[in-house]
Every structure is written in C-alpha cells, then in structure tokens.
C-alpha cells in the first residue's frame, strides 16, 4: 500500500482550488477541491500523484508539502492566481 499525504499550509484561511489525479494499480482517480481553505490535509492511496493547485486569495501564501514513503516535495506560491503543478512518483 502506497500512502500519499498532502499538507496545505501558509496564511490561515487562504483559499485555494486543487485538482488531484491519483494512479493506483493502473486505475486513475480524480479528486477536485473547488474552494478549500488553509490549513488542509489529504491522504490518498496510490503509486503516482499529479496535481494542480491554484491560490485564490489576494496577499496570501500557500505552502504544499507532499510525502510518499521517504520521498517528500515542498512547493509554495504567493498572491491570487499563483499556480503549482505537482508530481509525485
């Protein structure tokens, strides 16, 4: 079982949208968050994750931390419209 954990932090209350594609045993599942707020956490089971996260709030900061096993990636953006494209294999 491959657990992928996503932690969204930054400016408390900052709003974001997220679109996650999770691949597990050849099947792709999509999870869409139209309007989430910081802080937020997600856990998915899969071998691969692709995601796009867009910051919707002005003058706010968004940090995204993704961990799968011992692999970890961190990204951040600031200001409305800031978009992150994330991949974890």
Image (cartoon, rainbow, N blue to C red):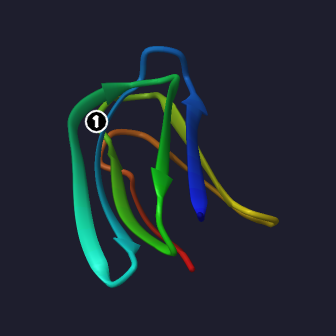
Instruction: Please identify the quadrant where the C terminus is shown.
Output: bottom right
Does residue 62 sit above or below 82 in this rendering? above
Residue 12 image offset from top left, x and y in percent = 53, 16
| Identity of the residue furthest to the bottom in this view | 26
Q: How many marks?
A: 1
Disc 1 marks which residue? 56
Residue 67 image offset from top left, x and y in percent = 68, 56
Q: Nearer the viewer, residue 18 or 44?
A: 44
Does residue 15 sit above or below 81 in this rendering? above
- Give the secondary structure at mark 1: loop
Instruction: Please identify the quadrant where the N terminus is shown.
Output: bottom right
Identify the residue shown where x is 57% and y is 56%: 4
| 77 horizontally vs 79: left or right | right
| 16 horizontally vs 59: left or right | left
Residue 39 image offset from top left, x and y in percent = 52, 23
| Identity of the residue furthest to the right in this view | 70
| 31 horizontally vs 51: left or right | left
Identify the residue shown where x is 48% and y is 57%: 45
Identify the residue shown where x is 47% and y is 24%: 38
Does residue 31 sit above or below 68 in this rendering? above
| 5 horizontally vs 80: left or right | right
Mark 1 crowd level (few <14, some 14–19, many ≥20, 10 Å Cα): many
State which quadrant residue 30 falls in.
bottom left
Identify the residue shown where x is 38% and y is 52%: 82
State which quadrant residue 72 falls in.
bottom right
State which quadrant residue 69 falls in.
bottom right
Does residue 20 sit above or below 13 in this rendering? below
């Amino acid at each position: 079982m491959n657990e992928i954990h996503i932690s969204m932090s930054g400016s408390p209350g900052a709003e974001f949208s997220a679109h996650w594609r999770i691949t597990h045993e050849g099947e792709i599942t999509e999870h869409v968050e139209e309007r989430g707020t910081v802080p937020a956490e997600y856990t998915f089971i899969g071998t691969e994750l692709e995601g796009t996260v867009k910051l919707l709030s002005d003058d706010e900061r968004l940090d995204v931390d993704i961990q799968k096993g011992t692999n970890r990636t961190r990204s951040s953006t600031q200001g409305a419209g800031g978009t992150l494209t994330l991949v974890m294999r």
